[in-house]
Image (tube, grey):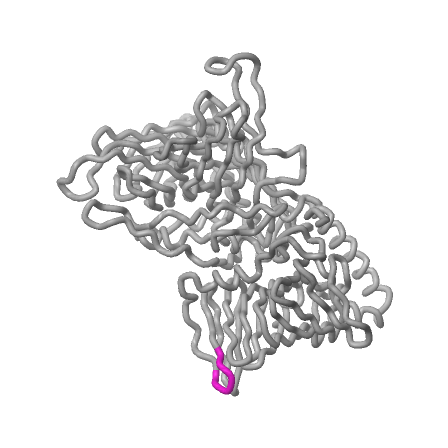
Amino acid sequence: MAKSPTSGFSLLRTALLGATALVLLNPVLAEARVGVTSATDGDPKGKPPSEAERVLRIGIDVQANEIITTGANDRAHLVFLDGTALTVGPNARLTVDKFVYDPATKTGDLAITASKGVFRLVGGKISKNNPIAITTPSSTIGIRGGVVWFSVTDGQTTSNFVFGDKMTVTGQGVTQTATRPGFQVTSALGLPPGTPRVIPPGGLSATMGSLEGTGSGSGGSGGDADGGAAGFGAGNSGSGPKIAGAPLPSMPPPSVTKPTDATPPVTPPVPTLVLTTRTNHIDNSSTGGTDTSLKGFVGGLVEQTVPNQPVSSRILFSGGSPNDVKIQTNAATNRVEATIVVPTLNPGGAILTYQLGGLSNNSGVSSLFVDDKTYFAIDQVVDPTRRSKATVPGNPPFQGPPFDVDIASNTAIASSGIFSQAQVFAQAGVTPCVCDFLTFGSWIGDVAYAPNGSYRPGQIDKLDRATYVAGTLSTVVALDNLFNQANLPGANQQNFVATYNGHMIGTAQLGNTPSYAAAGTYQNVWSFGARSGAITGSFDGIAISGTANLINSGPGFVANLNVPIAAGVGSLNGAFFASPTDPVKGQAGSFLLAGQRPAVANGPLLNYQAGGTFAAQR
C-alpha cells in the first residue's frame, strides 16, 4: 500500500539529517552519499559505481557517479545534501558526475549529465555561489540560484528558465544567457544554441505533464514524484500538484480582455509559471526568507453551482477585516501556513474557514516557501486540527446551535512571485505598487459540499482567481500618537497628511459573459488629525471616489465608494500596514463594485460586478 505524504517526508527528513551527520563525521562517506530519494512513482532505478542496480525507494541514498534511469511509467524526486532538488521524468537517464559540498561554508560543486528525458531542477545552497552544470548531448546548462525545466533528446535540448539569477546554455563554443524568468533556449546537436526567447504559451505543459505521477509505483510515494518541489507551477498546467492523490482543480485565470457584444470574449492561454526575483523582503532583509506572521484581506468573485441547475451564478465576496487572511512562514522548514476566513461567501450567514499549508515537514506536500515574495500553500489534508470548514449559525434558516461542517476544499494561494499578476497590470496600463513590506497574490480553486450533507448539499463554489494582500498591521498606538500630535494647539495639519498611491486588482463580470481580470489605480490622501481620507482612483476603467474613516482608533478603515455608472455602488475595507522603518507606511484592503454598464458605447445596460484587493504606500 502506498505511504502517505506525511510518512514520505518523515523519511526524507530522517534521511537528510542522517546523511548530514555522516558528512560531518566521515569525509570518505561524504564523497559517496550525495543525496536521498524523497519521492518516487513506479520503479525508477539507480546503479551506484560499485554496487548492483536497485529500485530507488523513498529514503534510499543517491551516490556520486550513480546512473539513474526511469521507464515509461517511472518518476523520481531527488534531494541533494545542499538542498538542491531534481525531479526526473519518465524514460530518462542521468549520471551524478560530481558533488562536493561544505556545510560550514555552504559552498561546493554539482555536475550532472542528462542523456535523455524531462527534468526539473531547483537549485540549493551550492547554486547560490557556483552554477550547477548540466551536460546534455547538445549543450551544457548552467543554473545559478534558481529553477530550470529542461527536456533532452539525442538531437536537441530545450531549457526553460523560470527563476533565479541567470541560466547559461553553451554549445559549439557559443554561450547564450537568460537573465529574465520565462525565457527559453533551444540547442540542437552540432549547432550553437539559439538566442533566448519567451517560453511560448503552453510551452511547459508537456514538461509538467511528464513530471506528474500516478501514485501507483512500488516506490511508495503515494502520489506525485514531483510534488515536493513542483511548487504552484504545475497548477498552471490544469492538473496541478497532488496532495494525497488529489489534483488541484483545472481553474485557468480569467481573461484580461474585457468582453463586448461586438467582440466575443477571448480567454488567452493559461500563462506559464513565472517567478520574479525580489531583493527587498517583508522584513527589509536583502536575501532569503524569514519567519513572518502577517494579516490581511481577500476579495473577488466566486461561481456557485447547484445540482441539476445548468445555470450558475457569480457572487462577490470580500474580507471585511484584516484578520480574514493570516499567513505564517518558516524559513527553517521552507514552509508556509495560511488561514483564510470568508464571512460573506455563502448564504445563511455561514462563515467559511480555509486552512492551507503547514509549517512543519510533517504537514505533507502542502506548501513551499522560497522567500517572502515567492511561496504557495494548498489546502491542509494531513493535520486533523486544521480542517477547512463552514460554521453554520443556529438562527433561521438553520435551527439549533451553530455547527461546523467539513468541506472538501481544493484551493491554493500563490504569491505574485509564483502566479504572476504582471499581465493584468500591463493590460490595464497600471504600474503596480512596489510595496515590499506587503505580500500579495491569488487564491484559486474550488469547494465541494457533500452530496448528502447538512449544508448546501452537492453544491460547488469555484473561485475566479480571487486576490489577497497581507502584511504587518500598524498599531493603534502609532495611529493614536499621530492623531494626538496633529491635534496639539498650533500643530501644522499639513505635517500630518499623507498621500498613499498604489493599485487595485481583481476580477469583474459584465452580463452573462465570462469573468475577466482587471486592474486600476488607488490614491488616498489621509489626514491623521481628522482620522479620515479622500479616496480617488479607478478600476476596470471606472472612476471611483469616496471618504474613508478610521474604525475606532484603527488600524482598520471603511469607505462607501461613488461609482459613476448606472445604479453604481461600491464599498472598501482597508487597514494601515507598517514597514520596518515606518509604522504607517502603507494601506491595503479589499473592495466591491456593482451597477450597470454597456459592453459597447450606446449599447444596452448589463449587470456589472467586480471585486478584489488594493495596496498602496506613501
Please report the residue visible at 74 percent of the width from the left and 75 percent of the height from the top: 65
* Residue 118 picture quarter: bottom right
Q: Main secondary structure of the magenta part?
A: loop
Counting from the top left corner in percent of width and height, residue 234 is at 52, 55
Residue 438 located left or right of residue 522: right
Would you place residue 338 above or below residue 415 in this image? above
Would you place residue 215 above or below residue 187 in this image? above
* Residue 211 picture quarter: bottom right
The magenta-colored residue range is: 187-192
Please report the residue visible at 71 percent of the width from the left and 53 percent of the height from the top: 220
Would you place residue 489 above or below residue 5 in this image? above
Towards the viewer: 615 or 329 = 329
Residue 362 located left or right of residue 427: right
Towards the viewer: 454 or 584 = 454
Residue 217 located left or right of residue 206: right
Counting from the top left corner in percent of width and height, residue 43 is at 69, 62
Taking the magenta stretch, the answer to whether it contains residue 188 is yes
Please report the residue visible at 61 percent of the width from the left and 77 percent of the height from the top: 115
Would you place residue 191 above or below residue 488 in this image? below
Towards the viewer: 60 or 350 = 60
Counting from the top left corner in percent of width and height, residue 67 is at 71, 74
Please report the residue visible at 43 percent of the width from the left and 61 percent of the height from the top: 202
* Residue 307 picture quarter: top left
Taking the magenta stretch, the answer to whether it contains residue 494 is no
| Residue 501 appearing in the image | no
